[in-house]
Amino acid sequence: MSNSRISDVLYDSETMLRLVDGELEELREDVPDPGFRGNHVGVVLALMQRASAEIAQVLCTLHTSREALEGVTLQEIHDSATKLGEVSSATEIAATRMMDGLERSHGLVDRLDELGALDSAGDGVIESAAVRAKLRDELFAVMGSLQFQDITGQQLGHVSQMLRDIERRLHATSSLLSGGRAEAEVIAGEQLPTFSESASTQNSFERQASADAIFWGCQPSKIAQ
Amino acid sequence: MRFLVVDDSATMRRIVVNSLQRVGFSDVVEASDGAEALEKIASVDFVITDWNMPKVSGAELTRAIRSNEQTKLMPLIMVTARSVRDDILTAMEAGVDSYVVKPFTPQVLREKIDAVLATRVA
């Protein structure tokens, strides 16, 4: 059932209850002699009114539950999906970069073997130094790509926190519906993840430039230095 | 010059240490959180710290360093995945000398180190 459909049903139910309530009040006033008509009518009316009040309370609880789930929770689910998508993408990009770097490194090692054979004739010495330098660059670039692990770890920590929050909201809603207390459950000793909501492997150069602009823009004395 | 690298991620510590070595700084000690860093601070000349760490965060570590008469002038760079304006301003208020956003390259780290050391000389 869609949210709008549920909303319509709740609205209709409330309207109907108000009508019933009004009718009951009128009926109570129309009874000319409760003593003559017997206390039965009064008792029945009281029971119906109590039932009406209970139903209204249930509807109120449903409203509260819906409000507790909507909005923030839906946004958190959306954000979680986005973060997980970023993690998946970052993992794929890092793996591709590392694989490319390792393949190039293999090629460089092969070239070093060839140059080693030439060294005996004295032709490969200069180039082999250049190839070794290039190989170091490639291997270090592979190491640098491993930074994705720290960043995706933080993104997953963010998702984990949002899922915990959703869990607490669902728990609170369940408590409301079962007549319990609608308070968020806090797990004693729970180890909360440390993370940055803005952690990302994307656009690293632009984000560094932006950070520099903010950092130095707010410290005019340091710019002069 | 001895560097102290503070990060709760062992992988990141190794990457920072290797980056430092690659740009010419081979004397490096490590700490896995701010509390351990404060124990080692007396023996180092330059601090490079992460932000998000258990127990004592990088921002708290920076404040602690700046509030101690013995270490208040310690060169310090924050290397972090946080990159929004409010975070950078918080780091500045805490007292960092420079700010590096993860993922970073050794060249960027070297530029920031040189810039911080230049301000100390000046």
Image: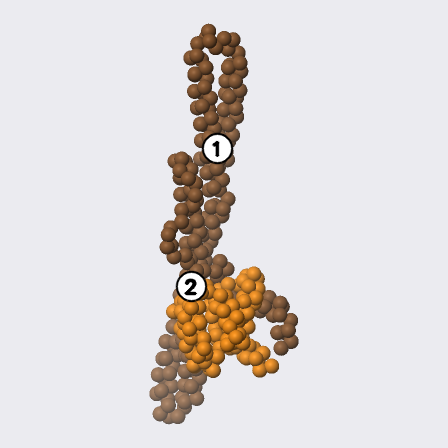
Chain colours: A brown, B orange
State the image coordinates of residue B33 (x, y, percent, origin top left): 42, 68
The chain to which mark 1 is attached is A
State the image coordinates of residue B98 (x, y, percent, origin top left): 54, 72
Question: Is residue B79 among what the camera can see?
Answer: no
- For this orientation, the residue located farthest to the bottom is A121
Q: Which mark is residue A17?
A: none
Q: Considering the image in quadrants, where does the N terminus of chain A appear? A: top left
Between A21 and B110, which is closer to the camera in this rendering?
A: A21
Q: Which residue is painted at 52% across and 70% down in the image?
A: B67
Q: Is residue B85 left or right of residue B24?
A: right
Question: Is residue A63 among what the camera can see?
Answer: yes
Number of labels in the image equals 2
Q: Considering the image in quadrants, where does the C terminus of chain A appear? A: bottom right
Note whether A29 is above or below A160 in the view shown.
above
Amino acid bearing label 1: Cys
Q: Secondary structure at mark 2?
A: loop
Q: Nearer the viewer, mark 2 or mark 1?
A: 2
Q: Label 1, on which residue? A: A60
Q: Which mark is residue B55?
A: 2
The chain to which mark 2 is attached is B
State the image coordinates of residue A16 (x, y, percent, origin top left): 50, 24
